[in-house]
Amino acid sequence: MKKKMNIALIAHDNRKDDLVRWVQSHKSELLRHDLCGTGTTSKRIADATGLSVKGYMSGPLGGDQQIGAAIAQKEIDMLIFFWDPLTSQPHDPDVKALLRIAVLYDIPTASNPSTADLMLKALAFSE
């Protein structure tokens, strides 16, 4: 496993605060990696933590598809996507396509803080 990973950070509106809190609590570990994310999420994380987060477009405007394309190009190694299981998303086909491509290219994917914690612990253990 690579020491420096390219990690995508995405969250639906009702989960953005959860992801920002998670990133804040793992800032020291995440400093060692390259981070990216969709529009508002990447900006909120960067503003709240001071971390450098490459921003793609907003998810509904094509950001999910951009992240999926980056996964297919082997530019992203890990996906942390706090999606909202209780709210219908107008761009649901894009979300499903992103999750499908993450599975197809066999990249670790977390949809909640517990799984994201385990993935970071695995990174630290492999180092």
Image: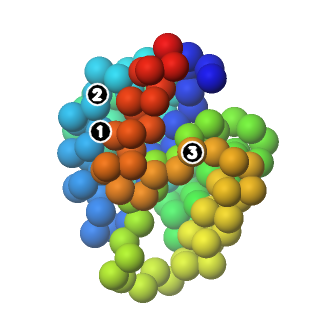
Q: Earlier in the sequence, mark 2 or mark 3?
A: 2
Task: Report how far apart the C-alphas of labels 1 and 2 lie in the structure.
Answer: 6 Å
Question: Circle 3 sits on which residue?
Answer: 108
User: Which one is nearer the viewer's eye here, 65 or 78?
Assistant: 78
Q: Residues within 10 Å of mark 3 (few under 14, many from 20)?
A: some
Q: The N terminus lies in which quarter of the figure? A: top right
Q: Which residue is tagged 1?
A: 23
x, y percentage for residue 42? 41, 45
| Residue at the outermost right position | 73
Taking the image as shown, residue 100 lies to the left or right of residue 82, namely: right
Q: Are marks 3 and 1 in contact (CB under 8 Å)?
A: no
Name the kind of residue labelled 2 in the image: Lys
Residue type highlighted by circle 1:
Val
Mark 2 touches mark 3? (CB < 8 Å): no
Reading the image, the residue beneath label 2 is: 27
What kind of residue is marked 3? Pro
- Can residue 56 be seen here? The reply is yes
For label 1, the SS is: helix
Q: What's the mark number on residue 47?
A: none
